């Protein structure tokens, strides 16, 4: 039995279906991310878990008990708000103690717990300050401490890092992960930032139009997207539409419109339809001046595409190239800049061979 | 662009200064003349407190002043309670039947000519056979000033971040406690301002009090008004100055109180 | 059900007491005004007939209904005094509102262009006179405007006039009093809209070739229309029914409707005619009141 089971939950606002009969299991101790474009229903789902919205249908089981209709204060779940929602009239200490007082904890225990939380988020010496005397990063940590103080079974985080600047955000991501590992609390985070979700979460649920498109580990989400939509939403990808002409030895041959016949290793479960897209991530497309020897692919088949470099974008860590194939189709490739000097670089107008192995690409249904 | 701004500013500051002078000068002159020793209000006869002494010895005036203060204090308190409740209903009640009528009844007295409000309340009191005097004036003032309290408190409530209330519920408060522990402390300055506004409006009113009071129980503004109709008297200057002083003290006290309440934490509260 | 709904229940319960209070002391009294405006004057206490007595049974009530008539309204229409006082009230209110706008706009504009910190100070400075009694402020002007008051002595000392000018009991004095009393009501809503305005809009207008004057008329003024509307209504409506200011400062040869109502009620003791005057005044004010109510609601309740 998972800690949290969401079963056929739906929520509509007027005619707009924010969450559409969604089911999801979350295990104890997970760091789960809900990722999706704005308006996909991820915040509504989170607010239903917190109790700020009540589902129109479906059940939310926490430890086997249905809490779908329970009021927010009756749930062993706490939330960290996007804008932190710190009580401006209370000090840091009183903000953190707020939930403990409501739980009827003894005075001495409250003091001990607050000290513990203050130390946990490294806010020692700030206890007497009011929220408006804190920096953005400090406020974020007070909000975190306040929502963790009651030791909730599940902590909900609504875009917890959105209000921080980029540098601070990266450091805070690491702190948040470290904290989650230490406490073992189940974290559910809502974010629209895929890098953030990939970095922190052990599993990611991608939402679109009120439904879950895929639930997977960050690696599987990126390397084995379940659909063309996911593949395009998470990261960058080259797609060639075509038709499967043969299936043998776990190898598919696909006749594509833009890139000739490509050989793709078949994934499990196999695709049922013959009309497919061949998908390849840009960093898996290698470039060379002449055709690679067939042993470079090992036991795999190598797909070779001849073309001309049209665009070169130097981005520091990587350089991205656009290669125009003879068919007129474009292939994007990104190459890590492993050497400081540019001896390996290609120039616009140069003829190159873009190649990738059958294991590095996959087929996706339309 | 910078040049345009400075030339704008010169015009702005002039407009602002003239506007403020227009607002303040008459009051300042009145205060100065209340300390005039001369009986002729226009001739400066040196500094003196004689008109204050005269006021404190004027029994009728003192009685009226006392009644006005009682009416103002009581009606402002009632109006603050009712007006705050009304503001909560409007700002947090979402849609409910009769809401349009409710908000209409609360917003229109703000601009309703006082002669109409006064006359209609009087006719009600006559129909109810209520004895006119202290209580009828108090009820009348409560009715009209609670609308001002509602507007002040409601605008604070609507501008308040709703996620604060959600956070309170998330941390274990039922809706009522969330309101008492989080919302109420945050709108307290507005509630205090509402009380002050109600108090001064009541202390100020001539027309509605004239309609709703009975024979023999005049409020201070009614007395001042009937004196003023006969011409300027130095004693009135003194009374007016005292009223201004009272309001000033109240404003300063209120702003201090709201500063202190915001400096205090929850630790001090028994809850 | 959403978080907002969780609060809605208790909030509606809170509204019950003020709701009942306003129905009893604001709505019901208008019923009495309407009823008495249709009654006859009588020398009695209360001075009108019929007096509805619900203990006398249906017949008596029906008879009482039969006695209601529109005579009072007929009187109002036939007597020039009333028609003139309504016309005068509207004229005074329109003129005062225009003057208030002309004076209030530059002040509000000046406030809105001040540095942030100073805006708050200016705001307090505008509000504080509002806290001091309105009667006191009128009285302060009587001090200044009287025959040997400060204004005349300054004018004489500067040799601008050779003999004291009569200020009191003139329309000029009344307009000064009205403008003085209502100025904060004009400035505050204007300031509220002007302060919200993005300064970069004016820069954009300038960038696109508008002179500062054109930018003001083409950008600032249209965007401040809601504030102008709110300020104008906030002043216009109560000024139409104003009593104290014209009574203390204006002459007695022409009356505003608030004064005639007062006169009928307190001097002539004619409650039915006073009520009819109130009903007519109210009817006159219904369109601006509805407009004002809508503006208030939009401002206080947003578009949700």
Image (spheres, coloured by chain):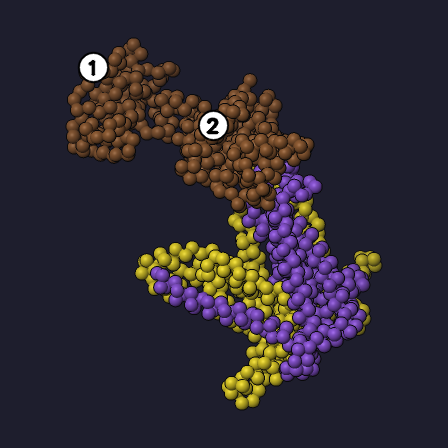
Name the residue at 71% across, 55% down: B78
Give the mark nearest the N terminus, 1 or 2.
2
Which mark identifies residue A177?
2
Q: Which chain is purple?
A: B
A104 relative position to A325: left or right = right
Q: Nearest the camera: A143 or A20?
A: A143
Tell me, yes or no, if residue C46 can be seen here: yes
Q: Percent position (x, y) of residue C127?
A: 57, 63
Q: Give the chain of mark 1.
A: A
Task: Name the residue tied to disc 1.
Answer: A294
| Image-based side of A288 in relation to C200, left or right | left
* Chain appearing in yellow on the rendered image: C
Mark 1 lies on a secondary structure that is helix
In this rendering, does residue C71 appear at all? no
Res A257 → quadrant: top left
Label number found at residue B269 = none
Up-down relation of residue A263 to residue A168 (above or below): above
Q: Residues within 10 Å of mark 1 (few under 14, many from 20)?
A: few
**Image location (x, y in percent) of residue C214:** 36, 64
């Amino acid at each position: 039995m998972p800690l949290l089971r969401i079963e056929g939950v739906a929520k509509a606002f007027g005619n707009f279906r924010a969450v559409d009969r969604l089911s999801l299991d979350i295990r104890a101790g997970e760091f789960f991310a809900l990722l999706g474009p704005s308006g996909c229903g991820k915040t509504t789902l989170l607010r239903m878990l917190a109790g700020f919205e009540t589902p129109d249908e479906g059940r939310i089981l926490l430890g086997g008990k249905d809490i779908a209709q329970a009021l927010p204060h009756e749930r062993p779940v706490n939330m960290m708000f996007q804008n932190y929602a710190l009580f401006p009239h209370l000090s840091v200490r009183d903000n953190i103690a707020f939930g403990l007082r409501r739980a009827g904890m003894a005075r001495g225990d409250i003091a001990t717990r607050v000290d513990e939380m203050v130390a946990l988020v490294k806010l020692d010496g700030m206890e007497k300050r009011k929220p408006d005397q804190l920096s953005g990063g400090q406020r974020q940590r007070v909000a975190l401490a306040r929502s963790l103080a009651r030791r909730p079974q599940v902590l909900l985080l609504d875009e917890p890092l959105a209000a921080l600047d980029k540098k601070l955000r990266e450091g805070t991501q690491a702190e948040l992960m470290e904290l989650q590992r230490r406490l073992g609390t189940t974290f559910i985070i809502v974010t629209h930032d895929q890098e953030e979700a990939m970095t922190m979460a052990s599993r990611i649920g991608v939402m679109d139009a009120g439904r879950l498109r895929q639930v997977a580990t960050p690696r599987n989400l990126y390397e084995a997207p379940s659909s063309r939509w996911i593949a395009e939403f998470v990261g960058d990808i080259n797609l060639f539409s075509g038709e499967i002409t043969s299936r043998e030895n776990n190898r598919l041959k696909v006749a594509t419109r833009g890139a000739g016949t490509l050989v793709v290793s078949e994934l499990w479960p196999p695709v049922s339809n013959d009309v497919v897209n061949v998908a390849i991530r840009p960093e898996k497309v290698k470039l060379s001046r002449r055709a690679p020897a067939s042993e470079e692919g090992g036991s795999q088949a190598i797909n070779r595409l001849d073309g001309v470099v049209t665009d070169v974008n130097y981005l520091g860590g990587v350089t991205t190239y656009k290669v125009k194939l003879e068919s007129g189709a474009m292939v994007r490739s990104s190459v890590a800049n492993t050497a400081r000097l540019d001896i390996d670089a290609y120039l616009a107008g140069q003829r190159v061979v873009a190649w990738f192995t059958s294991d590095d690409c996959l087929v996706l249904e339309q | 662009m910078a040049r345009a701004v400075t030339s704008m500013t010169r015009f702005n500051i002039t407009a602002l200064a003239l506007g403020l002078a227009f607002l303040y000068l008459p009051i300042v002159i009145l205060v100065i003349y209340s300390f005039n020793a001369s009986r002729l209000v226009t001739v400066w006869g040196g500094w003196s407190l004689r008109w204050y002494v005269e006021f404190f010895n004027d029994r009728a005036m003192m009685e009226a002043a006392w009644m006005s203060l009682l009416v103002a204090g009581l009606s402002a308190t009632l109006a603050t309670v009712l007006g705050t409740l009304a503001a909560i209903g409007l700002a947090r009640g979402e849609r409910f039947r009769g809401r349009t009528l409710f908000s209409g009844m609360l917003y229109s007295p703000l601009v309703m000519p006082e002669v109409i409000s006064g006359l209609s309340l009087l006719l009600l009191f006559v129909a109810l056979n209520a004895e006119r005097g202290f209580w009828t004036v108090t009820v009348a003032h409560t009715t009209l000033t609670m609308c001002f309290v509602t507007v002040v408190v409601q605008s604070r409530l609507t501008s308040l971040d709703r996620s604060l209330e959600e956070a309170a519920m998330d941390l274990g408060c039922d809706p009522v406690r969330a309101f008492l522990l989080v919302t109420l402390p945050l709108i307290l300055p507005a509630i205090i301002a509402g009380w002050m506004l109600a108090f001064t409006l009541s202390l100020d009113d001539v027309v509605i009090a004239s309609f709703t009071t009975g024979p023999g129980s005049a409020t201070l503004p009614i007395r001042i008004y009937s004196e003023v109709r006969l011409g300027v008297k130095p004693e009135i200057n003194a009374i007016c100055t005292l009223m201004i002083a009272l309001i000033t003290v109240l404003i300063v006290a209120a702003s201090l109180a709201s500063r202190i309440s915001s400096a205090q934490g929850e630790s001090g509260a028994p809850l | 059900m959403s978080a907002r709904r969780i609060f809605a229940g208790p909030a509606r319960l809170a509204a019950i007491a003020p709701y009942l209070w306003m129905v009893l002391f604001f709505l019901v009294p208008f019923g009495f005004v309407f009823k008495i405006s249709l009654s006859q004057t009588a020398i009695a206490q209360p001075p009108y007939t019929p007096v509805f007595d619900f203990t006398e049974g249906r017949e008596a009530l029906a008879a009482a209904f039969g006695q209601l008539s529109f005579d009072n309204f007929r009187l109002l229409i036939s007597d020039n005094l009333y028609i003139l006082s309504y016309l005068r009230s509207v004229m005074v209110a329109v003129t005062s509102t225009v003057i208030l706008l002309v004076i209030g706009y530059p002040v509000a504009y000046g406030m809105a262009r001040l540095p942030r910190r100073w805006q708050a100070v200016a705001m307090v400075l505008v509000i504080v006179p509002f806290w001091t009694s309105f009667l006191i402020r009128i009285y302060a002007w009587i001090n200044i405007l009287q025959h040997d008051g400060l204004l005349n002595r300054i004018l004489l000392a500067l040799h601008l006039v050779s003999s004291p000018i009569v200020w009191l009991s003139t329309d000029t004095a009344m307009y000064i009093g009205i403008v003085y009393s209502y100025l904060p009501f004009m400035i505050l809503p204007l300031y509220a809209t002007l302060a919200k305005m993005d300064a970069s809009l004016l820069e954009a207008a300038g960038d696109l070739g508008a002179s500062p004057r054109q930018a003001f008329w083409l950008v600032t003024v249209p965007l401040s229309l809601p504030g102008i509307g709110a300020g104008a209504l906030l002043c216009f409506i109560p000024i139409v029914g104003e009593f104290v200011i014209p009574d203390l400062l204006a002459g007695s040869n022409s009356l505003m409707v608030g004064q005639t109502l007062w006169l009928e009620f307190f001097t002539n003791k004619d409650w039915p005619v006073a009520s009819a005057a109130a009903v007519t005044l109210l009817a006159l004010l219904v369109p601006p009141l509805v407009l004002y109510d809508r503006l208030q609601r939009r401002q206080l309740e947003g578009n949700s």
